Image (cartoon, rainbow, N blue to C red):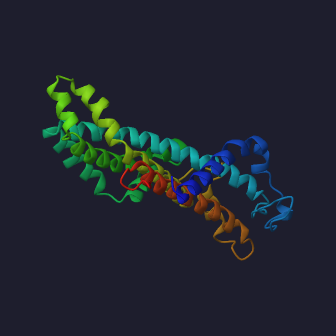
Amino acid sequence: MNLTGRIGAAIVAGLVLLAVVGPLCISPEQVTYQDLERSFDPPSWAHPMGLDENGRDIFARVVYGARVSLTVGVIVVLVSATIGLLLGLLSGYVGGWLDRFIAGFWFNVFLAFPGILLAIATVAFLGASLTNLIFALCVIGWVGYARLIRAQVLKVREYDFVLAARALGASNVRILFRHILPNAIQPLIVQASLGMAGAILAEASLSFLGLGIPPPTPSWGAMLSDARTHFASGWHMTVFPAAMMTLTVLGFNLLGDGLREWLDPKQRPR
């Protein structure tokens, strides 16, 4: 893997470690404890990221927000990639009327709506909660994976080793999962890494609009929404959650670029 990919992997590993270990060292009471007499206190040794408008520790809330963001990203990517993988395999391999129905109808139906607006409408209709948020992001996320896998299957199914396996009497299930899938899944791995960044940004966007995880559970998007009217008196309320979000998205994007080069033999350095 190239240098940028290693940097991205290091950033992602650090964030995962923070999300897993951080809440074990910080009690939930520190996240919700309010000291109104010290509202908007700047960063200090006792509070490295300062206090918010309610006197809550921003560092503790950022750490718990990392767990929320990564949890949403992982679940959304796993569910969306699984649905997209299965539909893309069926559509690309079977072809015919099934391909026209899935790729020609369902893909276009979901692509006709702007993704974030569809997610906003879904959460607004179902209500703000973690489950509904994940469901809304999965609804808009599977199409990209399905289109990618379908395109790969359409290419791989015409290779000589697939035609040879079919001529030798191999079943369609064996051909699909033994020969086609291993040679078509590499782009999906890269897309999943980049999709983590998109899912985290989408979760933050919905939380910023008040359609994410309800309080008092901390979320980076909700923290930025609370801080937008207090920038003059509490600049740290905006800077630290925004910096963590930027670092997270940057890490996954760098990791995705590194995986793209590492998994592609044509781009892999000798």
**Measured from the top left, where is residue 96 in percent x and y?**
13, 39
Q: Could you tell me how many numbered marks the image carries?
A: 0
Horizontal side, residue 233 vs residue 182: left or right: right
The answer to whether residue 135 shows anywhere in this view is yes
Residue extending farthest to the front is 270
Q: Which residue is at 69% across, 73% downward?
A: 231
Between residue 191 and residue 260, name the one nearer to us: 260
Q: Position of residue 146 (x, y in %)?
A: 31, 45
Q: Quadrant of the C terminus?
A: bottom left
> What x and y, as percent, mark residue 263?
41, 48
- On the image, the x and y values in percent for residue 136 come to 43, 48
At horizontal 26% and vertical 48% (from top left) the residue drawn is 151
Quarter of the image holding residue 204? bottom right
Q: Nearer the viewer, residue 37 or 162?
A: 162
Residue 210 in sight here:
no
* 68 left or right, relative to 140: right
Relative placement, left or right, of 242 versus 135 is right
Q: Give above or below for 142 relative to 62.
A: above
Relative to the observer, which residue lies in front, 120 or 251? 251
Please indicate whether residue 196 sits to the left or right of residue 93 in the image: right
Q: Picture quarter containing residue 59? A: bottom right
Say above or below: 247 vs 67.
below
Q: Residue at x 63, y 46 (%)?
A: 16
